[in-house]
Every structure is written in structure tokens, then in C-alpha cells.
Image (tube, rainbow, N blue to C red):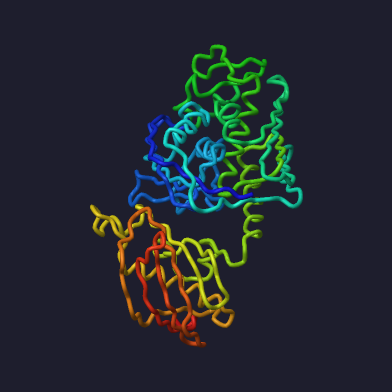
Amino acid sequence: MPRQQRTIREPVELTGEGLFSGRRTRVRMLPADPSSGYLFVRTDLPDSPVVPATVEALGEGFRCTTLEWNNVEVKVTEHLLAACTGLRVDNLMIELNTDELPALGGSAQSWADALNAAGIEDQKSERPVVELEHTLAVSEGATTIVATPAEDELAISYVLEFEEGYRPAEAFTVHLEPQRFLKELAPARTFGFDTDYEQFRRMGLGGGVSDENTFILCRDGSVEQPLSRQPAQLRFPNEPVRHKIVDFLGDIAVINADLHAKVVAVRSGHKLNAQFAGRLMRLLEEERPEEFLDVREIVRVLPHRYPFLMVDRIVRIEGEQKIVGLKNVSINEHYFQGHYPDYPVMPGVLQLESLAQTAGVLLLRKLEHAGKVPFLVRMEGVKLRRPVRPGDQLLLEAETVRIRSRSAVVRTRASVDGDVACEAEMSFMLVDADAI
């Protein structure tokens, strides 16, 4: 059964050194609108670009999960996203001033504590769910992930096999829910092998490694602290395999949906976890109602692109008569930097543009209008009724009054929490795309 989406109640800030770079990073986590997912904001770069935690943004990372969007990277996202998955925090804006999240304790514990300290609250929208009908499996060499159907839960079994001499194989199973995550998974730290030292040194990595946030497995079976090389005390007898489950949860968070399944993973790492997330995402897209369109499907219909694509999602289409879309108004919108920056409000013309684009999706969904572009030629009865501010969610409604082969009239309205923000009747000409 679907649950309500959740976000944090108050902003919360953490600082620490990146495990790989050693650079000090400040992270500020803020509440986000329903269906926003996890949005990383690089405040150290011009215009503070946003990197979404999605399957499409997964990049090639060295021993970590890396997100890349429009040539902007964010590294080592897996521990924070695992904490979000474990505590069921679905929407979050994460501001950071470098390209790498801090190691903190080398686990998900500090992230989970910060999320709980900020307060976690329900939102109005339901959380999407991936429910399997058949077995789903991905593999590469000796690594495998197999998922089978399960009702209303995620159970994960992980088998970790080591090279000869290190440790006996470890296995651990957990039925995921917040309290068990906090007790049985969140404290498990990242680890490496004694053979990793030289490789990290040659690459100039590991500047944030400490005796507290990492431990080293040695070929003779011993466990050491990475810097002092003194014997290390494990938090669990099987701490390595528990941390592997933390990584898995962080890696599949990019599907932005709950997974109900029984999962068995054998020696999987970030690369195979990403392949598994991609398979889950395809299943989720197949399960969505036909009337639902996310931003990837919207750009297949509309010619607009960032930063001028003003519609985030289509949530309902009623034949050729009516369409309902959403626009999440974020403080990171480019126009807020120069439009009343001390009192940010969304320009009325951009509210109307959002409505025009929503109407355009409705008009272009008709098969006979494929290959055409809607040009707005007239607006009548325009009314701007209330300011729209950062954090608001615009509900965009468009209903056809009259539609012909070359023209259309559409009645539009945008509202926030049921209050009308703007409305207008719009007339469009449908022009052949190859004639432009």
C-alpha cells in the first residue's frame, strides 16, 4: 500500500572533510516539494547548478557513487541517500560547496541523526512504489542481484565473499524499516583492503580518511585502523557486509520510489547496483498510468529546454479536453537572482508561460498535431491574483474551448494550495515544425 511522501521540517547543516579529496565541505539540507526527489545544489559554482539524484544522472565514480548533470558532478552521495531511504525521507534539497559530500563518520549514522534532528514530516502526495510481478536479475561476472516479489516490504540479503586470506564470507539479512536501519545498518562504516593504500597514494586520494571513519581488512585476517595501523574494533562482527547494504540502499535511491521485493545481492558494488536501479526505473515507467508524464516525456513533446522548460510533471490528461500539470517553484530558479531578489516572487509572465506550455502538451498529444509547434498568438481575460513564491507548487490546468487543425483556444488556470494565482484564455496557432 502506498504511503505519503516525506521531507524534513527544518533546514539542518553539517560540515566535514571529503573522504577522497580531504576538502572541507559544508552541507545544508532543506525541505523540498513533493515529488522533487533529491536535488543537490552546487553553491560553489556560478548560478548554483542543480544535480538531481536520478538514474539518468548516474556517472562513473571511483569507488563511490557519482551523479553528473550538465557537466556538474556530486560525489559520494550513497551514505546520505541510504539514510534517506532507511528513514523514508523522499524529497530533499542538499546544498554543498564542493563536489564531494563529507565523510563524517564514514557511515550513514551522522546523516540519519541530522535528518531526525531536522524533523521528518508527511506531505500530501503518495510515494510511488515498484512492485515486482516476476523475478528480476542483473549480473556481471561473479556479482549478482536477484529480486523476487514481496508484499509491502523490502527485505535485503547480502552475501559478501572475500579473496582468500582476508575473512570468511559474510551474510546478513534485514527487513528494512526506520528503527532497524538506525540500529543495524546506519553505524556500519566504509572499509578498504591493505592493497588499496598504494593505489590511493598514487591517485592523490584519501585525504579525508581517518582512524574513526574507515577500517582496513588485511590479508592475514586482521582488521586495522588506516592511519595508525593499530588494531581496529569493529562495530559489528560483520560490519563490512552491513556497510555493503548501506551502499546498496543509497545506490537505488535514484529511482525515487519505494521498492517492495526480496533482494539477494552477491558481491555487488556501485556499478551493478546502478544497473539494477536502471532496471527498476524501467519497470516503474511501465507501471505508471498512461496519463502521467514526467519531465523526460514532456521534452519529447515540447521543444522547450532548460532553463525555459516550465513544467515539471503532467499528472492527469482527460482525453483531448483537459490537462493538469505541476511546476515546483524553487529558490534556485534563475530568474529569482534578478527579479526582486530581496522579495522573490515568480514573474506573472512566467506563470502564464507555464500555463502555455501545459496547454502545448495537451494540443500536441493529438496524433494529427505530431510535427507541429503551438505558437501563442493571443491572451484574453488575463488576471494575476496572488504572488507565487519559492517553495510553492503551481497546479497548472488547461482545458480546450475550441480546437481545429491549425488553431486552438484553451482556458487556463494556475493555483497554489487551491488559491488561484493567475488565469487566462489563450489562442494558439499550430505551425509545422519543419517550416520554422
Residue at image point 52% right, 48% down: 5
Residue at image point 37% right, 40% down: 97
Percent from the top left, x then y, of residue 238?
A: 65, 23
Spot the residue most to the front.
Answer: 418
Question: How many numbered marks appear?
Answer: 0
Q: Judge by depth and name the residue closer to the eye, 343 or 170.
A: 343
Does any portion of residue 426 appear in the rendered image?
A: yes
Spot the residue most to the right.
Answer: 134
Percent from the top left, x then y, of residue 87?
A: 54, 37
Residue 422, quarter of picture: bottom left
Residue at image point 43% right, 48% down: 32
Does any portion of residue 62 appear in the rendered image?
A: no
Q: Judge by depth and name the residue closer to the eye, 318 or 190.
A: 318
Spot the residue most to the top.
Answer: 230
Residue at image point 73% right, 42% down: 146
Report the side of 83 relative to 392 (left or right): right
The quarter of the picture where the C terminus appears is bottom left
Percent from the top left, x then y, of residue 30?
A: 40, 43
| In the rendered image, the vertical position of residue 314 relative to residue 70, given as above or below | below
